Image (tube, rainbow, N blue to C red):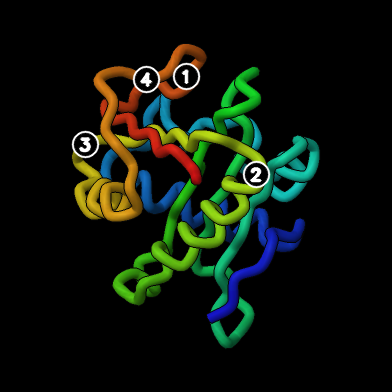
Amino acid sequence: MQIREIEEKDNRTIERIIKRSLESFNLNIPGTAYFDPQLGSLAQFYKQQSNARYWVVVNEQDEVVGGVGIAPFGLETAICELQKLYISPEAQGMGLSSELMKVALNFAKEHYTYCYLETVKKLQVANLLYSKFGFQPLDRPLAGSEHNATDAWFIKKLS
């Protein structure tokens, strides 16, 4: 497996992975990433922002099997957001989420003081991963949150 920055040719595949994952948890609802307007053009979306990146993990056949992004959180210059960490079902359980987290957090440390993320409580495996990487739970979302269907929020001090 290889991790690289997203390219335009990857947009459709990662969009499909994200949507199928959300559908499998009945999270294909407004207020989740499912309805993000940029979901079909992540390569362009992340290139347009400063201090933002999206990485994909590809298998031996150069097929995208997952991804993760870091982008500024709202107008906060010291806070980034970990975004759209998804792995296709056939590639789950191989440690790819951890590898993507390492790449994303190493990038985040170069540009930000804190990393924030929004999720839902029923994604227990994901939430365990965030805790393992030192994210602390919050009681409520940070001001400026755009995903109103989330019910779990985490923050990590980067150092």
- Residue that appears at 46% across and 51% down: 85
> First in sequence: mark 1 or mark 2?
2
- CA gap between label 1 and label 2 equals 21 Å
Q: Amino acid at mark 2?
A: Gly
- CA gap between label 2 and label 4 equals 25 Å
Q: SS at mark 4?
A: loop
Q: Which residue is mark 1?
A: 145
Marks 2 and 4 in Cβ contact (< 8 Å): no
Label placed on residue 141: 4
Q: Where's residue 31, x and y in %?
A: 42, 24
Q: Where's residue 67, x and y in %?
A: 53, 58
Q: Which residue is mark 2?
A: 40
Marks 1 and 4 in Cβ contact (< 8 Å): yes
Q: Which residue is mark 3?
A: 121
Camera-near label (2 vs 3) is: 3
- CA gap between label 3 and label 4 equals 13 Å
Depth check: give the residue in front, 77 or 152.
77
- Residue that appears at 26% across and 32% down: 137
